[in-house]
């Protein structure tokens, strides 16, 4: 892939096509991305490489020297472990998460497409902010990307990673106006609610995380409007992807929402369900956290 960008530029210029013409409306490939690919500073993902080959009217193999653009299987395994398995501030799980990031950065990061690098940057920044409580680990990424993300009508996995980081920074900053605007939050919630059918199944783990994070913020700020539909979509998503790791947290937010509506009986039922699911996951650490949270909510 060392000569990919050079070949693309030479073929494009031979055909007398400008970068702007090549990228059309930039829905498949932006001018900036093409410039980075041609300079050799970015590797395209498979979809973008196929798009480039089609625009140049050549075979993909002729510009990739028949090198594979497939994402390594082990990298995907690590990424989805990070996306799927929560740490709940448990020391052993935090240590394991650090090791997962280390393996990605040591073995895969430099050869990943730019989109994948951005996902990992977002996830790693969130981990650093979460672990340290220092929002400055993530503010640069938010400053660079969030203004674009909040304008979108549908989200990619990259966008979800940026939003996830934004929500964590907002919560840790205690919703300081420099880092959080209610109008932006409402736009995010509304847009997330129409994402279900647009995302690949494997990307809905992060969608579910975001839905639950949005519910948490809405509960904290007493913004009740979207709580019920977000909880419903979260449950639907978990059933669809058969991912019940977050079911205890889902039920925790259910009990908090019931308490917000002064429904103690329903809240107790959801508390019991949250503990039941934690026991099914054999997670004693989480059971204790849920019990502490229940006591705090009822004092």
Image: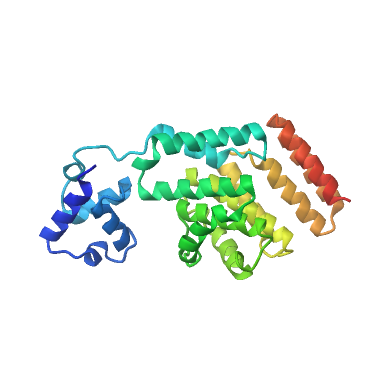
Depth order, front residue of 288/133: 133
For residue 221, side relative to residue 11 (left or right): right
> Can you see residue 235?
no
Q: Locate the N terminus by quadrant.
A: top left
> Can you see residue 8?
yes
Residue at the far bottom in the pictured view: 183
Q: How many marks overall?
A: 0
Residue 199 percent location from the top left of the image: 47, 51
Q: Residue at x 40, y 41 (%)?
A: 109
Depth order, front residue of 299/104: 104
**Image quadrant assignment for residue 289:** top right
Residue 2 percent location from the top left of the image: 23, 43
Q: Residue at x 26, y 50 (%)?
A: 40
The way the protein has been coloured in the rendering is rainbow
Residue 196 percent location from the top left of the image: 53, 53
For residue 40, side relative to residue 145 (left or right): left
Residue at the far top in the pictured view: 282
Q: Residue at x 21, y 53 (%)?
A: 54
**Image quadrant assignment for residue 85:** top right
For residue 176, side relative to residue 274 (left or right): left
- Residue 206 sits above or below residue 191 on the image: above
Residue at the far left in the pictured view: 14
Residue 156 percent location from the top left of the image: 45, 54
């Amino acid at each position: 892939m060392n000569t990919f960008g050079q070949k693309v530029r030479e073929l494009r210029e031979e055909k007398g096509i400008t970068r702007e013409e090549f990228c059309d409306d930039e829905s498949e490939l932006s001018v900036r991305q093409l410039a980075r690919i041609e300079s050799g500073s970015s590797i395209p993902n498979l979809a973008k490489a196929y798009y480039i080959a089609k625009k140049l009217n050549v075979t993909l193999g002729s510009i990739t020297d028949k090198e594979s653009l497939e994402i390594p299987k082990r990298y995907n395994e690590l990424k989805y472990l990070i996306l799927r398995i929560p740490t709940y501030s448990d020391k052993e799980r935090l240590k394991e998460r650090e090791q997962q990031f280390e393996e990605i950065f040591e073995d895969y990061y430099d050869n990943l497409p730019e989109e994948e690098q951005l996902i990992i940057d977002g996830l790693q920044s969130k981990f650093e902010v979460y672990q340290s409580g220092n929002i400055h680990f993530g503010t640069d990424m938010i400053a660079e990307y969030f203004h674009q993300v909040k304008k979108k009508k549908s989200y990619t996995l990259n966008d979800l990673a940026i939003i996830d980081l934004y929500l964590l920074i907002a919560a840790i900053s205690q919703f300081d106006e420099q880092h959080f605007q209610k109008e932006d939050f409402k736009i995010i919630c509304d847009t997330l609610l129409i994402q279900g059918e647009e995302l690949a199944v494997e990307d809905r783990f992060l969608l579910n995380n975001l839905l639950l994070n949005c519910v948490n913020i809405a509960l904290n700020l007493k913004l009740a409007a979207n709580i019920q539909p977000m909880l419903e979509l979260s449950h639907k998503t978990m059933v669809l992807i058969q991912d019940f790791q977050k079911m205890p947290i889902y039920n925790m937010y259910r009990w908090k929402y019931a308490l917000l509506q002064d429904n103690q009986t329903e809240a107790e039922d959801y508390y019991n369900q949250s503990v039941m699911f934690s026991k099914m996951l054999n997670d004693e650490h989480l059971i204790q956290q849920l019990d502490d949270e229940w006591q705090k909510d009822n004092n």
